[in-house]
Image (tube, grey):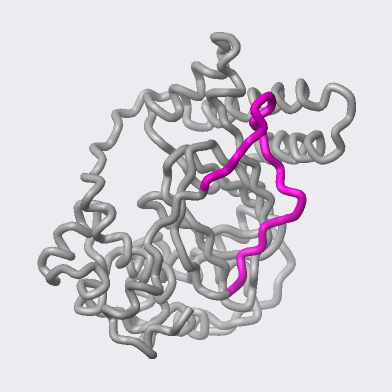
Amino acid sequence: MNHPAENSPADSCSDLRSVIYDERTLDRDFPVHLPEQVYWTPDSKAVSLHYHHNFEIGICMKGSGIFFIGKKIIPFRTGDISVVYPNEIHIAQSLEHDPSSWIFLTVDMNRLFDADASHTAKLYTELTETQGKVGTIYHGSAQPKLNALLKELITELHDRLPEYRFMARTLISMIVLELWRIHGGENNPLAEAPEPHSIEVVLPAISYISQKFSEDVTAEKLAALCHISEVHMRRLFANVVGSSPFEYLYRVRINAACAALTSDVKRSISEIANSVGYTSISSFNRHFKKFTGLSPKEYIASQAAAEPTESAPRQE
């Protein structure tokens, strides 16, 4: 892919595929897929957001970064679990110099549980329809039961011992129940979805920010990628994402910084601020406080308290 600096913003649009439908063919009798190899997310910038029609759950085996799921931007690290529901646009983006590897399981829930009116099917329907799509990242240390169930499911699918399909189906039911419990069984109202046309128009801008968040991003460039005026781009972007383009950009930068602060203790706070696009440490600290409610030092301390690890002191 050509670097945008080598082309005009309008020309770059052809290189930035906004969203891809990732078609996955699953076994008709047992619609559960475990890939033979782990999926590597290199530390180059994300190329294309994608979606698929099945439920996906994954575990980060190595590395760190940020995960884009719908309107959410969530930092991840080794041991974290991703949950993506059908048709949610998403992509994982590794941090620079810290490529991540994942194991992703894909399940066609409707076909797996359509043979009977099972309680699992009812709970899954609540998660996807009554509560809305709640795809997110769960820290493995905060959800030990979900972590253990997923690892056992991966082992069953890998080893294929006698009756492994029955065991896998049982474990998937337990995972759905655990997800339902995590969300408290609350019936939250569904958020009003933006118009599909609006989503398609601004996806090039969203994709560009996911790739180039550490670089200089201008409204003029984003509008040119979408082939609309700046005023129109800002309005549609806010309708689709729920915030202005630059508020979204700053959220991406701060979430990338959060991931780096917990995974790369050798770099100073100022070095991390610079790596995610800030030339001013005061601007970085102000935005960090706005989006996390903590200073960078307080965030590091809170993460260390939640999951104690031996690490070297961090420089300013």
Q: Position of residue 85 (x, y in %)?
A: 48, 38
Q: Main secondary structure of the magenta part?
A: loop
Residue 31 at least partly seen: yes
33 magenta-colored: yes
* Left or right: 217 in relation to 259: left
Q: Check the image and report above or below for 12 versus 302.
A: below
Q: Which residue lies furthest to the top in this view?
A: 117
Q: Where is residue 297 in the image (x, y as percent from the top left)?
A: 50, 71
* Residue 195, image quadrant: top left
Q: Position of residue 102 (x, y in %)?
A: 67, 55
* Left or right: 226 in relation to 211: left
Q: Where is residue 133 in the image (x, y as percent from the top left)?
A: 41, 36
Q: Which contiguous range is marked in magenta?
A: 23-43
> What residue do we see at 77% from left, 24% from top?
167
* Residue 234, image quadrant: bottom left
Q: Check the image and report above or below for 63 versus 25.
A: below
Q: Check the image and report above or below for 216 versus 286.
A: below
Which sits in the foreground, 291 or 226?
226
> What residue do we see at 42% from left, 50% from top?
89
